[in-house]
């Protein structure tokens, strides 16, 4: 297995692992801690995107279509998007204002969009025998 695929699998599996752990924390501890409904919804969105992109990386690592650029955009986008939402959703419980992270979330989302767009371009440009 190429190191490119191995590292993609590690990132994908790590996103899945921490997505499950953080999802469980959100479903149990954060509800009991009194996290408001809006913040809990945001937190759950971050978990969902992290899980989706972890699964996507695990699948894409098995294909010829994953490029370093696609991988980089998906990993960086997931980290920026999800981590910024986690912190923003928890800022009241953490005892500080994380509003400065507000612009980070759409940057992460934009990187995810770019990663998926590059993947589509790679697939469409692929010369096939069909």
Image (tube, helix red, strand yellow):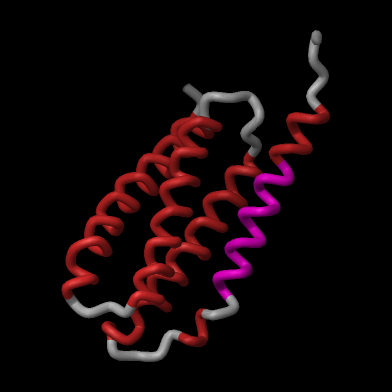
State the image coordinates of residue 37 (x, y, percent, origin top left).
35, 75
Q: Main secondary structure of the magenta part?
A: helix
Q: Would you say residue 116 sits in the magenta stretch?
A: yes
What residue appears at the point 38 percent right and 67 percent down from the top-left corner?
Answer: 43
Assess whether residue 109 is covered by the magenta stretch.
Answer: yes
Could you say where residue 78 lies in the image, as x and y percent from the top left? Answer: 51, 56
- In the rendered image, the quadrant that contains the C terminus is top right
Residue in the image at 51% along x and 80% along y? 101
Total number of numbered labels? Answer: 0
Q: Which x, y percent locates residue 86?
A: 39, 70
Left or right? Give the position of 26 relative to 73.
left
Which residue reaches farthest front? 37
Instruction: Answer with left or right where residue 51 lies relative to residue 5.
Output: left
Q: Is 76 left, or right, of 127 in this rendering?
A: left
- Residue found at the far bottom of this picture: 96
Residue at left offset 58%, top offset 25%: 63
Q: Residue at x 29, y 56 (%)?
A: 23
- Quarter-of-image position of residue 9: top left
In the image, is residue 9 above or below residue 118? above
Residue 70 as seen in the image, left or right of residue 105: right
- 29 up-or-down from 47: above or below: below
Residue range in magenta is: 104-118
Q: Nearer the viewer, residue 33 or 113?
A: 33
Q: Is residue 82 above or below residue 89?
A: above
Extreme residue toward the top, this view: 129
Give residue 118's position: percent from left, percent from top: 73, 43
Determine which quarter of the picture holds residue 65.
top right
Question: Where 20 falls versus 121 (above or below)?
Answer: below
């Amino acid at each position: 297995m190429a190191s490119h695929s191995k590292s993609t699998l590690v990132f994908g599996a790590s996103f899945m692992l921490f997505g499950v752990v953080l999802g469980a924390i959100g479903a149990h501890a954060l509800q009991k801690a009194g996290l408001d409904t809006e913040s809990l919804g945001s937190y759950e969105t971050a978990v969902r995107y992290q899980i989706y992109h972890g699964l996507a990386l695990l699948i894409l690592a098995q294909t010829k279509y994953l490029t370093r650029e696609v991988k980089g955009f998906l990993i960086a986008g997931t980290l920026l998007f999800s981590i910024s939402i986690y912190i923003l959703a928890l800022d009241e419980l953490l005892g500080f204002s994380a509003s400065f992270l507000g612009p980070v979330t759409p940057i992460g989302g934009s990187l995810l969009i770019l990663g998926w767009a590059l993947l589509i371009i790679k697939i469409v440009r692929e010369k096939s025998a069909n």
